[in-house]
Image (tube, helix red, strand yellow):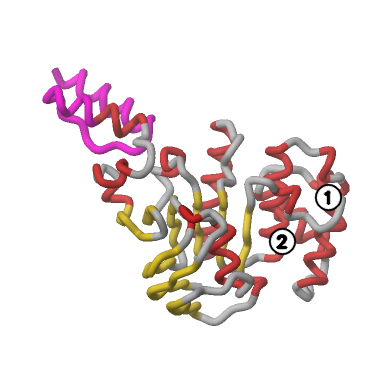
């Protein structure tokens, strides 16, 4: 599913997060990092809950509300029931999912997010924040949308949680050709995962690029520069030759090779 916004304008409750004559495309089989707008606003535009004041939105192939999966930083507000089992059946009925075995489908989704099948019987109010987010992702995987919007989803995650999330993102992209949008103000977690980035400021696209452009200085006028990129820029200023690494482990190997070669 490919999403194209063509000169779209839309007012947001937060004036800074509005859209002002925006043209951009989100592709299938792609992970796009965006910052400066609300993921919820984007979702509401796509499902028609939020009206645009001008412009057009093209979705190809045409889909339904089921094709859009939204993952919030506050998942408890998104759930319509009290337990994982009830929520699974609520979604199954809502989207008319004709699975032969709903439980088996949900067990598979839980396994993908590294949770056991015991979570199917858990109440949401007994889960930690990170458990709740994993369950939220499992429930989205259960109904299998074509587009995933992660709206500050990584907030509160430790490095182990981030690693599992990136593993799921890569699988969704590589194995299932999903369209993935990550909304966040911290690009550092996703340097080695994203394909493209689009940065908004006061409703307009101010800088965009792909993973080859992550050392673009204009990008860090609007978001915080990751430590690995700041470090490599500092080293290069001292006439030490290092490649533009995006992964800390690869950076360490590069430094080791550089020292060995002297």
Image quarter hosting the C terminus:
top left
Asked if 116 appears above or below 64 in the picture, the reply is above
Q: Can residue 254 be found in the magenta stretch?
A: yes
- Residue reaching furthest left? 239
In the figure, is residue 74 to the left or right of 119? left
Q: Residue at x 59, y 58 (%)?
A: 40
Judge by depth and name the residue closer to the eye, 31 or 47: 47
Residue 55 position by quadrant: bottom left
Judge by depth and name the residue closer to the eye, 111 or 90: 90
In the figure, is residue 74 to the left or right of 24? right
The residue pinned by badge 2 equals 142
Q: Residue at x 26, y 24 (%)?
A: 255
Residue 195, percent from left and from top:
38, 55
Residue 46, percent from left and from top:
56, 71
Q: Residue at x 49, y 68 (%)?
A: 10
Report helix, strand or loop for mark 2: helix
Residue 154, percent from left and from top:
57, 42
The residue pinned by badge 1 equals 120
In the figure, is residue 144 to the left or right of 259? right
The numbered dot on residue 99 is none
Residue 222, percent from left and from top:
35, 44
Confirm whether residue 195 shows in the render: no
Asked if 228 appears above or below 76 in the picture, the reply is above
In the figure, is residue 99 to the left or right of 184? right
Bounds of the magenta segment? 233-262
Q: Which SS type dominates the magenta stretch?
A: helix
Circle nearer the N terminus (1, 2): 1
């Amino acid at each position: 599913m490919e999403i194209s916004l063509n000169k779209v304008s839309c007012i947001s409750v937060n004036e800074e997060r509005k859209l002002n004559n925006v043209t951009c495309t989100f592709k299938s089989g792609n992970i796009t990092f965006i910052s400066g707008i609300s993921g919820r606003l984007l979702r509401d535009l796509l499902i028609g809950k939020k009206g645009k004041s001008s412009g057009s939105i093209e979705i190809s192939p045409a889909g339904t509300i089921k094709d859009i999966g939204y993952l919030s930083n506050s998942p408890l507000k998104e759930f319509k029931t009290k337990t994982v089992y009830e929520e699974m059946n609520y979604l199954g009925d809502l989207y008319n999912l004709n699975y032969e075995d709903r439980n088996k489908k949900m067990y598979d989704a839980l396994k993908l997010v590294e949770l056991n099948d015991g979570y199917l019987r858990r109440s949401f109010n007994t889960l930690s924040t990170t458990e709740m987010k994993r369950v939220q992702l499992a429930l989205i995987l259960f109904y299998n949308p074509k587009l995933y919007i992660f709206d500050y989803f990584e907030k509160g995650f430790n490095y182990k949680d981030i690693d599992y999330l990136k593993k799921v993102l890569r699988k969704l992209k590589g194995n299932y050709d999903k369209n993935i949008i990550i909304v966040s103000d911290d690009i550092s977690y996703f340097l080695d995962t994203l394909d493209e980035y689009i940065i908004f400021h006061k409703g307009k696209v101010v800088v965009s690029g792909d993973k080859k452009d992550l050392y673009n200085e204009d990008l860090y006028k609007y978001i915080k520069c990751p430590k690995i990129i700041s470090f490599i820029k500092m080293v290069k200023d001292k006439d030490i030759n290092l490649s533009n690494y995006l992964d800390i482990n690869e950076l360490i190997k590069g430094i080791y090779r550089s020292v060995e070669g002297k």
